[in-house]
Image: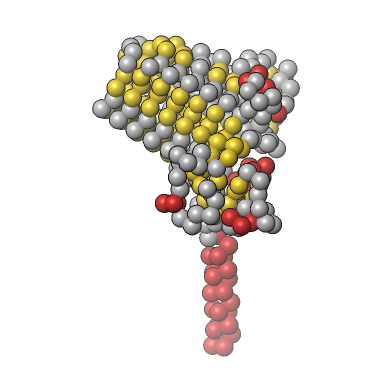
Amino acid sequence: MNRYYLLLRSFVVCLCIVAGHALQAQVIYVTPNGAGDQSGSNWANAAPGSQLQNKMDAAWDGSEIWVSKGTYYPTSYPANSVFTGSYSPSARNYSFYLKSGVTMYGGFAGGETNLGLRNLLYNPTVLSGDIGVAGNSADNCFHVVVSLGGNNATALDGFIIRDGNANLNSFGSHTVSGATVSSDIAPGILLINSAAKFRNCEISNTSSLSFGAVYNNDYSSTVFTNCIFLDNSAGIGTISNSGTISLINCLLFGNTTQYTAVNYGNASFTNCNIIYNTGTGFVNFTGSATLSNCVIWGKYQII
């Protein structure tokens, strides 16, 4: 019996080792054109940009995706999308849907062996919604980035997010997993029931009919650190919050909207500059707002 017990114990230990390796977080490498066998296993075999969403979707919880300099465009919407009414799906519904528990890093030249070797200034990594005629926003994506149900290990770090155009007010809807993905708000980043984090990012050159460039919904809790919001236009709010949002060391500059930052939930701004924007700098309609060591050029209103 002891012999069988030892064999069984050895088998269980082997299973645990295999499972541990299977669940180990991975690093996936992506360049605009890919390289080698395009598996994403290292820089020499980097996956192409056209596979970025697929690589996100297949990544394990806790994994990282390292993305080299260049411009990347969304190529799909989720397979479980449902379109109703007069809403006709098109490439404009494409977005980068963040995978819960996965962190994407930009700013690589390609070849780096650790995150400390990144250079965000010299290696701009762009997520762009300009999928149609270059420079013509009429056919751009409604949203560049969507985080739907992402946990607090979900993150984007070191990206320029730009060229979204949420300009469709339709008598229909686009839903994903039961959540409405409105086409007239959040051309930069749409957060739905999400706890995703954004670090060292620029959100720029977006436009929307209503809320934009970032909309954080009622059940989302997100943090932006060291981010720039630049040259965005919207009906109401470059940043619009109905949930919980924190901005740390951020700059809102040159945006055109009625209100630059709008809060309906819980908002915290620390060491932020809201300057040279058109319209009121900050408006707290409902909920609570805390601003610490911030500069606002323009009106501040509590309504």
Question: Where residue 290 sits: x, y (%)?
Answer: 30, 25
Q: Nearer the viewer, residue 235 or 303?
A: 235
* Residue 169 sits in quarter: top right
Q: Nearer the viewer, residue 300 or 2?
A: 300
Question: Where residue 139 sits: x, y (%)?
Answer: 67, 22
In the image, is 297 to the left or to the right of 1?
left
Question: Where residue 12 sits: x, y (%)?
Answer: 56, 74
Using the image, determine if residue 175 lies above or below residue 234. Answer: below
At x 74%, y 22%, the residue is 88
At x 62%, y 33%, the residue is 95
At x 61%, y 38%, the residue is 72
Can residue 159 be seen here? The reply is yes
Work out which residue is located at the far front of the displayed protein and give it: 122
In the image, is 210 to the left or to the right of 34?
left
Using the image, determine if residue 94 lies above or below residue 138. Answer: below
Using the image, determine if residue 299 lies above or below residue 271. Answer: above
Question: Where residue 298 sits: x, y (%)?
Answer: 33, 13
Work out which residue is located at the far left of the displayed protein and give it: 293
The figure's colour scheme reads: secondary structure
Can residue 57 be seen here? The reply is no
* Residue 26 sits in quarter: bottom right
